[in-house]
Image (cartoon, rainbow, N blue to C red):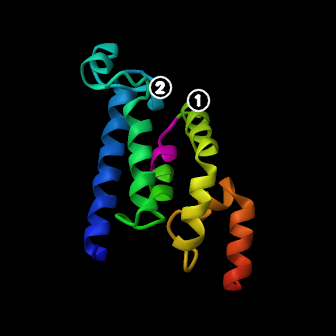
């Protein structure tokens, strides 16, 4: 895929994430469990039996797209940063729980994705310090 298409994919996912965060806040629902204005009815109608909220599914999609180079590999970290910027503490805890569950995949994506520190690198540094130490050693970055 071209860089322009990868950027478009990232932009689309970030827009969806922003809309879901706004909708969850307006509905006074936890971000990671938000399933739309219809609440549990939406889960039964279109969720395929999954108990995951829309943001959880969006993060899974973003991770898959990053891992398979459909989007820029660092895009998942940009998406995570965007979600955390406007989230309340309890939502951030749920996001970090998701990150902990995906740590192996995230670190696989991360080392190949960062040629230079940039988008998402600071979040990666906080989440996976051993990975960023390996990156700094590999690239001679302080």
User: In the figure, residue 57 lies in which quadrant?
Assistant: top left
Q: Which residue is drawn at 27% across and 54% down?
A: 12
What element does badge 2 sit on?
A: loop
Place of residue 124 in the rendered image (x, y in percent of width and height, measured from the top left): 61, 60
The N terminus: image quadrant: bottom left
Give the residue displayed 45% in from the left and 26% down from the top: 33
Q: In this view, does 23 lie above or below 108?
A: above
x, y (%) of residue 100? 64, 43
Q: Residue furthest top?
A: 41
Task: Report the span colored magenta.
Answer: 82-87
> Which residue is label 2 attached to?
30
Is residue 65 or residue 133 the one in the foreground? 65
Residue 118: x and y in percent read 53, 72
Name the residue beneath numbered marker 1: 90
Residue 57 vertical placement versus 141 (above, below): above
Look at the magenta stretch and give its main secondary structure: helix
Please indicate, yes or no, whether residue 141 appears anywhere in the rendered image. Answer: no
Does residue 131 lie above or below 141 as drawn? above
Q: Is residue 70 left or right of residue 117?
A: left
Badge 2: how crowded within 10 Å, few (<14), some, or many (20+)? some
Task: Residue at 29% x, 60% y: name it.
Answer: 9
Q: Is residue 17 left or right of residue 141?
A: left
């Amino acid at each position: 895929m071209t860089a322009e298409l990868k950027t478009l994919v990232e932009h689309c996912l970030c827009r969806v994430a922003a809309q879901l965060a706004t909708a969850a806040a307006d509905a006074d629902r936890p971000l990671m469990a938000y399933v739309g204005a219809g609440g549990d009815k939406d889960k039964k109608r279109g969720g395929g039996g999954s108990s995951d909220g829309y943001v959880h599914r969006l993060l899974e999609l973003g991770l898959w797209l990053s891992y398979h180079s459909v989007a820029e590999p660092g895009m998942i970290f940009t998406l995570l940063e965007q979600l955390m910027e406007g989230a309340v503490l309890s939502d951030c805890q749920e996001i970090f729980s998701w990150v902990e569950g995906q740590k192996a995949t995230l670190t696989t994506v991360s080392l190949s994705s960062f040629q230079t520190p940039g988008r998402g690198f600071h979040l990666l540094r906080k989440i996976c310090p051993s990975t960023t130490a390996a990156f700094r050693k590999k690239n001679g970055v302080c």
